[in-house]
Structure formats: C-alpha cells, structure tokens
Amino acid sequence: MPRPRLLCVDDDSGIRELYHALFSSHGYEVVCAETPGQALTELRSQTAPFVAVISDYEMPGMNGLQLAAIVKRSHPGLPFILISGSPRDLAEASAMVDATMEKGCGIRELVDGVETVLAARVPVVTARSGYLSLGSALAGAASLAFLLSRLWP
C-alpha cells in the first residue's frame, strides 16, 4: 500500500529537511518544494495524489496565502496547512486554509495538526462506485468521533 504523500513548501532548506525527516518517520512520503512555483509544478506533475500541502507563509515571490488560493482553485479538496511566525498572518489566512500553525511549534503539535486535518476529511461517494466501502465508512465515523471528543470533552 502506498504511503500518503505530503507536499511541504518552504524557502528554508533546514525546515524542508526537518519536514522530510519528521513526516517520513511518521509514514508519509514527503515531497519538498523550495518555492511556491516549484510546489505548483509538483501538483501539476504528480504521479500520485498528495493528501495535504504544508506551506510557510513568508516566501519570496509569492506568499503562502497566495499559494493556498491557487491550490484551492485547482484542488479544492486538498487540505492546506499554513505556517507563520506572525499571528496577524495566521488570523488573515484562517478563512482560506484548512489549518494554521505558529512557526516554532513543537514537533508533536506539528504532526498532530497534520493528522487532525487529515482525519477531518470526509470520505466522498464517487460516481464510479456509488457507495462507500465499509472501511471508508468506518474511518469516517472514527474520524468524526475523534474530532467531536476533542471539541466537546
């Protein structure tokens, strides 16, 4: 079974290396892009679909929020997580992206944030199958139960 693919976008090579090591160790296939332009190229030429995009906010040429707007137009169901050191940037972006996280958050918080966003994805009935598999239905129900338990303890 193929590993879920994450697209991580950051102009800092150290952060890209961290993402690669961290998420690879948690079972993800990680593709890193140095610029938003490279990220868009990866999305267009992907050999397998990505399960989420994780992007820095402040990058030269195009910021993460601008990248999110383009990604959401071309891949509306693809979760987008924006990371910034500025609370103002995060507040501005919260309506456009699936999650925001502060730069410098803990490693566990970063992994948990990604997994929570992915768990919140609701399985969709496809025109081809006409129904959900039992596994997809159970995964959706488990995800919903998990999220509800976090919201209403």
Image (cartoon, rainbow, N blue to C red):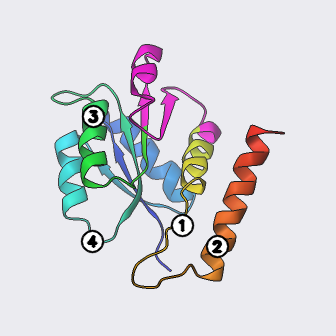
Alpha-carbon distance for marks 3 and 2?
A: 39 Å
Alpha-carbon distance for marks 2 and 1?
A: 7 Å
- Quickly name the residue at label 4: 47
Single out the residue that lies furthest toward the bottom: 129
Tell me the SS state at disc 4.
loop
Q: Position of residue 87 (x, y in %)?
A: 47, 16
Q: Residues within 10 Å of mark 4 (few under 14, many from 20)?
A: few
Identify which amino acid the numbered label 1 is placed on.
Pro
Q: Does residue 101 lie above or below 88 as drawn?
A: below
Q: Position of residue 60 (x, y in %)?
A: 19, 27
Tell me the SS state at disc 3.
loop
Identify which amino acid the numbered label 2 is placed on.
Ala
Alpha-carbon distance for marks 4 and 1?
A: 22 Å
- Mark 3 or 1, closer to the camera: 1
* Foreground residue among 101 and 72: 72
Residue visible at 74% across and 47% down in the picture = 148
Q: Are marks 2 and 1 in contact (CB under 8 Å)?
A: yes
Residue visible at 49% across and 61% down in the picture = 28
- Mark 3 or 4, closer to the camera: 4
* Foreground residue among 103 and 127: 127
- Quickly name the residue at label 2: 137
Mark earlier in primary sequence (4, 1): 4
- Quickly name the residue at label 3: 11
41 vs 16, left or right, is left
* Foreground residue among 125 and 151: 125
Q: Residues within 10 Å of mark 2 (few under 14, many from 20)?
A: some
* Magenta stretch bounds: 82-109
- Quickly name the residue at label 1: 123
Q: Quadrant of residue 110?
A: top right
